[in-house]
Image (cartoon, coloured by chain):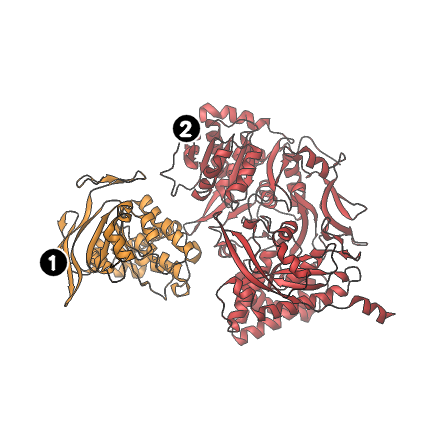
Amino acid sequence: MLDQTEGYVTEDGRKIGGVVMEMKNITLRFGGVVAIKDISFDIRQGEIRAIIGPNGAGKSSMLNVISGFYVPQEGQVLFNGKPRPQMRPYEVAQQGIARTFQNIALFEGMSVLDNIMTGRLNKMSSSIFSQAIWRGKAEREEVENREKAERIIDFLEIQHIRKTPVSRLPYGLKKRVELARALVAEPNLLLLDEPMAGMNVEEKEDMSRFILDVNDEFGTTIALIEHDMGVVMDLSDRVVVMDYGKKIGDGTPSEIRNNQAVIDAYLGVAHD
Amino acid sequence: MTQTSTGVDGLTSIPALLNRNASTFAGKAAYREKEFGIWQSWTWAEAEKEIEALALGLLNLGVNEGDFIAVIGRNRPALYWAMVAAQSVGAVPVPLYSDAAAEEMAYVLEHCGARFVIVADQEQVDKVIEVQDQLRQFQHLIYLDARGLRKYDHTTLHQYSNVQDQGRAAYDEFHPELVRRRDALNYDSTCVMLYTSGTTGKPKGVVLSNRNIIETSKNSSEFDDLSAGEDILAYLPMAWVGDFIFSLGQAYWTGFCVNCPESFETMMTDLREIGPTYYFAPPRVFETQLTTVMIRMEDASPMKKRMFDYFMAHAKKVGPDILDGNPVSGFDKLKYALGNLLVYGPLKNTLGFSRVRIGYTAGEAIGPEIFDFYRSLGINLKQLYGQTEASVFITQQPDGQVRSDTVGVPSPGVELKIAENGEVFYRSSGTFVEYYKNAESTADTKDAEGWVATGDAGFIEDGTGHLRIIDRAKDVGKMAGGEMFAPKYVENKLKFYPNILETVVFGAGREYCTAFVNIDLNAVGNWAERNNIAYASYQELAGHPRVLETIQEHVETVNRSVAEDPMLSACQVHRFLVLHKQLDADDGELTRTQKVRRKIIGEKFEDLVNALYDGSQQIYTETEVTYEDGRKGMISATLEIRDAKVVPVTAQKIAAE
């Protein structure tokens, strides 16, 4: 089913393009601890790619390698076919990568709208002076960015909390605001670190729908880490399974479901 | 009954009124909707263009005269246009409750045989698609918001704006036909069909003609002196007759502006931003708002709280009199003005009522305290009594004659009579044509002379001519000992406590009365927080001993007050329980307009009712609940049953002798 050069068509008829990001034999160590051991996989244009694994498998480390926050000791990260140099976080953002965090990282004292607007900072180029007097370019930019922010607010259905300080929001909504901030940067690649952790069933359903809608509406490529197997299997097009820093499976959800190594890692192996 | 056949100034249909408004009020705002954080607006001229484009698009899709077009979604200008566009092409709009489950929709869609359905978004599209196999006549589905729908099969699915574009493109082809159909509309053609939620049985399709809607809109607009300058907020379900009259009938008759909120959750913010001049809300909305205000005042600083209490007490004393124009001393007036500056004004602004000239409440009885609270602030809140079959208005309160215990005098053009058994009958130009495909029910409700049975028992007060409603006629019954049983009377008294959201009183044919109580999670939750009471769920809070104690106090206070009425003193609540779940329309326990379905509740919770009468102290129960998406689950609970003190009525009589 997988064509290595041309992409593929998913079961629900979406066309997946070529490789956006490729991990080649990645090894990441923290001192003597090997967090990731010789892992290779790719992420293709327009797909929802999941990374799953038990606790401590190295999933978040992997996401941090993708985002460029960690630099692996061995191996290569190819972005759009080219090896990626070490970059600062803002440079990563400028390349069209946005992310959310496992532990929400919002500005608690600021309103939802202001938090989302920070996602547009990269797109602002007017000078401090122009921004201070609020004329010309600064004003045009603000209007334009606000409109982008409002479209995302509408999209994620958070109109009612637009002016609410983030600190007053329940957990599920904070997660949604974080997603909004990532989306407003109009990313090509969206990284979600456990977007559904700690949510109840209803919140999970909402979040799943938003993730599918984002992919469908904006064509955003999404890489996500998730614990909830049911959610992962429903959402993603392809899944990488990690265990103790190693890749033990890679394929479509149905392939993963029947993969013996994965079943053993999750359910345990009988020792007889 | 005087009936004009030509209509007022030859305006015999909603599209005709639209045409008049588009020239008379061409540049004036007709619709506003908040979208992307900004209020977008359309003038009457623009609205006419939009409606015309959609109407042409509908012709392009093959709508026939007499077709039914269902409209499902929350209040949005485009959906109001859809209804008028449907009328323009000779079809009949049928607005549906957007929160109805797919199965409920299937019944209505099949009953009217809608060929076209116009919906707001994916949620509604999914519901229609789910049941489309049961719908024999259904052909085309038109949606407004394209989000999430890209991958759907578009052979019979159309985007609203595309339909309009195709309509505009085919202007030359279809315009003559549109004009022909529009001109063919007269006072007797059907304006709209609305399904009544019905406290019993399947919904019935109430057919209302242009005469019904336009005459009623004209009369009621003149009664309250409504002008083109009014602003209203359209937030009540579009399927409800009240919204149709306010947001379509009266809006088109007078040319005022209809404002649609951004979403259901932003309603209160949007209300504040718009500051409507004419406002309608069911009692529950006013109750909730008052509860919120009181909760927030509890959290205010002592200084603010003292000021609030002081001036509210003053407002309570003189506010209603000032509003009614009764004589009040100069000092009181001055103090009221000061209060207005410091408390009432800011409070009204927070509530979004700064500009309200006329406010109405109806549907259920409103608590005297709640009613007086708003009136003492200087908000001209009035009551009306109506139903779908009357195009809303049966009675309403004129300015200066407003009281919480009556529903007012007959509206202009309405005749009233009280039958032997106390049931209220009316006849008016707004009286419905028929129940669609249900001649039997039509004949049961409306007699040959046009008198319609309301199903409510009431009487006309001597002297004032105001109507007072006691209860649903069929709910008023006898207890085992022959005493009169009027559950609503007791329920309303209980519901006036902010802690109690809903209650159901049983007692017909029984020895004594008992009650189910639903707590108000907002009020009780806040109280729990204040008193360091931890709870994990609604169920746990509802079963908390201290909550039960509080409710018991309320029940006993109500018992004392009920005992004072010699006719109804037998209706005191002897035993009660607090329900483990909130009564919900999704479970069929309430109607979509949030009215209690007594019979269904009695059957569903039969075990609990029995426990109330067999003397047991607690009962274990399992209840099926329906989630919003239609799935079902079970919840179980052990409920405590409490005995409430009652005032011994017979003993009192002896004492009096």
Residue B260 percent location from the top left of the image: 50, 48
> Can I make out residue B346 in this image?
no
Q: Residue at coordinates 66% horizontally, 38% vertically from top-left?
A: B215
Q: Tell me where residue B161 sits by quadrant.
A: top left
Question: Helix, strand, or loop for circle 1?
Answer: strand
Q: Nearer the viewer, residue B67 or B478?
A: B478
Q: Tell me, for residue A74, which label it has, or none.
A: 1
- CA neighbours of label 2 inside 10 A, class few (<14), some (14 to 19), many (20+): some
Q: Tell me, for residue B497, which label it has, or none.
A: none
Q: Which chain is red?
A: B
The furthest residue to the front: A272
Residue A118 percent location from the top left of the image: 31, 59
Q: Amino acid at mark 1?
A: Glu
Does residue B90 appear to the left or right of B652 in the view shown? left
Q: Amino acid at mark 2?
A: Ala
Q: Read off the residue under disc 2.
A: B169
> Can I make out residue A196 in this image?
yes
